[in-house]
Image (cartoon, rainbow, N blue to C red):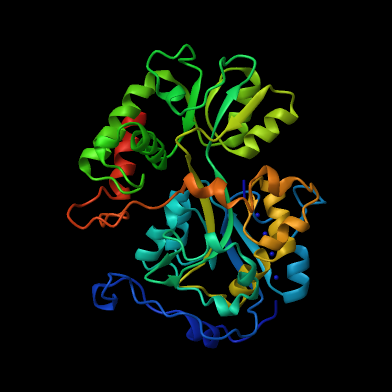
Amino acid sequence: MRNKRLFQALSVASAAALVLSGCGSSDSTSDSGLPKVEMMKELGAGEGQVNVVAWAGYVENGSTDPKVDWVTGFEKETGCKVNVKVGASSDDMVALMKTGEYDVVSASGDASLRLIYGGDVAPVNTDLVPNYADIFANLKMQPWNSVDGVAYGIPHGRGANLLAYRTDIVKPAPTSWGAVFDANSPYAGKITAYDSPIYIADAALYLMKTKPELGIKYPYALDQTQFDAAMELLKQQKPLISEYWGDYLKHVAGLKAGTTVLGTTWQVNINLAKGEGTKVEGIKPVEGATGWSDTWMISSKAKNPNCAYLWMNHIASPEANAGVAEWFGEAPSNAKSCELTADKNHCATFHASDDAYWTDVYYWNTATEKCLDGRTDVKCVPYSEWATAWSSLRNS
């Protein structure tokens, strides 16, 4: 789920010079290995447009639903036309941003570090984004949206990857992720899982809680032994799987039809399925859950950097952030948004300000060879190898 829009013309050359430079060559990296990319110092006049890569449902201009529009007002106020390209996956978004044709992206945690270390995005000057002040503190300066104390984006929203189950079929009600990994499950052939290499972290999280001898401390920091254990668990799970889902609407349809009765879900899937009369619930199991916290990031090659900053400030505003969160089905990132949702229970449903709820939600992050759990005596398996292993599993 995640769409389009306009400000006024000016000298793009001078605006671009203000902002962004270089990326990624061996003679232009910092001591930490980061490509040297300049941060924007001050905001200038808008260039007349901003080119956005976003998840479907994140950029709505009223064309999907006339009542759902947080773009038209922005265009009128700023003169920045919003042109949107919907990204089909995190891998798709990374590839699109590498072209240099887009100014901003709504990156999930399994893409953000790849974009940062690839030199594809620039540090963000949060002083130029006034609405940043109202973002929930526990979403700021996190491992997936900052490096070495430098912000690389504006937090957008968040959600947990829940365990869905058909309440009229799955009995007793599950409490553990073990329900989707049990080789003797009575629901074999009707279990589903998220179709992405990042799902390896779900297996790692389960092992982190159930096999402490493996020493897993963070599901995105896996040495070879830990990674092999996670992949072995997923291989054992595969015969149970009816479908690996990427399209949330297909997952909702599967729950409704009963072809899927148990497996990974998002809260929005549960809400939609319930709205269609399906007897289903979604829980965060006793082991906790993986989750996602998306980040608006600016291209290191942005041709419209001023409009890009104006867009990032707008989409982080209480009004726009409330609109996106409610339409998409997630917790907003702006604390003031909770007062503005049409459903006054929205923030309670999505645990927006419930800090305790998020303590055992492990937001998607990009696995790197440098272990993200702080270990220095071993190398961790990087995301590229996660992708290869996932492809091999899916095609086996």
Q: Residue at x 39, y 13 (%)?
A: 184
Residue at the extreme left of the image, as rendered = 377
Please indicate whether residue 189 sits to the left or right of residue 328 in the image.
Answer: left
The picture places residue 371, in percent across and down from the top left corner, at 27, 54
Q: Quadrant of residue 276?
A: top right
Horizontal side, residue 68 vs residue 334: left or right: right
Residue at coordinates 48% horizontally, 54% vertically from top-left? 93
> How many callouts does the rendering have?
0
Q: Is residue 294 left or right of residue 234?
A: right
Q: Position of residue 148 (x, y in %)?
A: 37, 70
Report the front residue among 35 and 356.
356
Q: Position of residue 302 (x, y in %)?
A: 51, 73
Occupied quadrant, residue 6: bottom right
Quarter of the N terminus within the rendering: top right
Picture quarter with the C terminus: top left
Q: Residue furthest front?
A: 356
Residue 381 at x, y = what percent? Answer: 26, 47
Q: Nearer the viewer, residue 387 or 226?
A: 226
In this orientation, does residue 190 appear? yes
Q: Is residue 76 above or below residue 289?
A: below
- Residue 15 to residue 178: above or below: below
Q: Nearer the viewer, residue 150 or 82?
A: 150
Report whether residue 105 is seen. Answer: no
Q: Would residue 81 appear left or right of 294 to someone viewing this image?
A: right
Q: In the displayed structure, would residue 43 be above or below residue 138?
A: below
